[in-house]
């Protein structure tokens, strides 16, 4: 596989698939979207590791990620706050103490944009990876692989250890505990780059179908998993296999789409992949605005993740994905052309 050109395109396609799955997981009822939560966020951590480059100093990492991750997080959070202040029923819910607690947990529900937890978490993943990259070098020895696997599974039980301490929600601040698990996927992407590239070069439609079925069955057996809430199912040993199978399906699909004649689909997914940060940053707010609007219009009481009328589950996905998100991207492009770089 030509990693200098095609590799970038299929990674963008994979990110495009991932961001649409994130929106889908937030718009349809949880009973239908459980399987998506087993792999869609791990996918982003792995893709980030796949394109990561080793930095010379911790200072460089800190400055770079503060500019490229924390600055967008803060800007989007501020814009979300402005929107909340303009809407009376959201504004009256704001209580300083509760907002501060949510900032601690990185789940900013009162600011109507809880998905921003990922940016905070990713920031700490990159910081945690720096010392690891200095101690662990390729090729990995069999002993190092075994140690990595043991530590990876031990991290799934970190919440049980943390629960013995008097911490809010029994979690570490700013999703640092989730970042430890995210680091596993980031590290696999970084250290297994060549293996992953060779694997996806042999992607076939039949394997996408077979692995999708396997992922569905195993997800059903393991039950609810969610990286954000630190839930890894009934059988924690299944978490990583299910996640990596789901990731493999997405990577295989991205390569098959890249090689296909469906140029329009390819271009759409590349667009979403290249603009995944912007789209991800605003999709949760857009979904909540959709639900609020139609609650007023139709007198409903729809909630995020709830079993809302199916027309609104589907409608919110399509409107947020294919109208709201492109408008957000177009708005920020317009601002950049006028040298207003707020992100």
Image: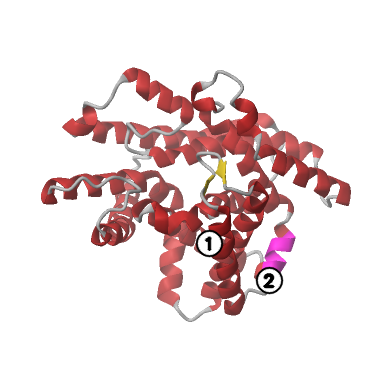
The front one of 221 and 313 is: 221
Instruction: Tell whether position 197 is magenta.
Output: yes
Label placed on residue 284:
none
Instruction: Work out whether residue 227 can be spotted.
Output: yes
Residue 102 locus on image (x, y percent): 41, 27
Label placed on residue 1:
2
Residue 84 locus on image (x, y percent): 25, 33
Instruction: Work out whether residue 64 can be spotted.
Output: no
Seen at 84% across and 45% down, the residue is: 144
Q: Is residue 302 left or right of residue 199?
A: left
Which element carries disc 2, helix, strand or loop?
Answer: loop
Residue 41 locus on image (x, y percent): 53, 50
Q: How many marks?
A: 2
Magenta range is 194-199
Secondary structure mostly taken by the magenta-highlighted segment of the chain = helix
Residue 262, quarter of picture: bottom left
Question: Of circles 2 and 1, which is in front?
Answer: 1
Give the spatial CA distance, label 2 vs label 1.
16 Å
Q: In the image, is residue 218 above or below residue 175?
A: below
Q: Where the N terminus falls, by quadrant?
A: bottom right
Q: Which residue is mark 1?
A: 14
Q: Is residue 302 left or right of residue 126?
A: left
Badge 2 or badge 1: first in the primary sequence:
2
């Amino acid at each position: 596989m030509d990693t200098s050109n095609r590799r970038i395109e299929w990674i963008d396609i994979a990110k495009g698939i991932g961001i649409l799955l994130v929106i889908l997981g937030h718009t349809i009822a949880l009973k239908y979207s459980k399987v998506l939560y087993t792999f869609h966020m791990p996918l982003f951590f792995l893709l980030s590791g796949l394109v990561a480059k080793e930095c010379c100093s911790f200072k460089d990492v800190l400055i770079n990620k503060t500019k490229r991750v924390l600055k967008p997080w803060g800007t989007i959070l501020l814009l979300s706050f402005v929107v909340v202040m303009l809407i009376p029923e959201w504004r009256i819910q704001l209580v300083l103490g509760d907002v501060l607690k949510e900032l601690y947990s990185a789940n900013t529900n009162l600011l109507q944009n809880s998905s921003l937890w990922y940016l905070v978490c990713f920031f700490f993943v990159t910081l945690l990876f720096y010392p690891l990259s200095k101690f662990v070098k390729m090729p990995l020895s069999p002993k190092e692989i075994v140690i990595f696997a043991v530590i990876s599974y031990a991290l799934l039980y970190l919440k049980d250890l943390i629960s013995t301490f008097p911490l809010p929600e029994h979690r570490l601040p700013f999703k640092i505990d989730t970042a430890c698990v995210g680091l596993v996927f980031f590290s696999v992407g970084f250290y297994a780059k060549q293996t992953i590239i060779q694997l996806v070069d042999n992607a076939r439609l039949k394997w996408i179908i077979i692995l999708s079925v396997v992922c569905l069955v195993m997800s059903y057996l393991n039950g609810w998993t969610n990286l954000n809430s630190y839930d890894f199912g009934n059988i924690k040993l299944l978490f990583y296999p299910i996640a990596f199978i789901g990731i493999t399906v997405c990577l295989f699909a991205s390569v098959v789409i890249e090689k296909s004649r469906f140029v329009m689909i390819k271009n759409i997914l590349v667009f979403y992949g290249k603009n995944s940060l912007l789209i991800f940053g605003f999709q949760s707010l857009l979904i909540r605005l959709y639900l609020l609007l139609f609650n007023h219009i139709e007198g409903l009481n729809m909630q995020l993740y709830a079993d809302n009328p199916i027309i609104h589950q589907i409608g919110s996905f399509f409107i947020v994905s294919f109208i709201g998100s492109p408008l957000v991207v177009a708005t920020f492009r317009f601002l950049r052309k006028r040298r207003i770089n707020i992100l």
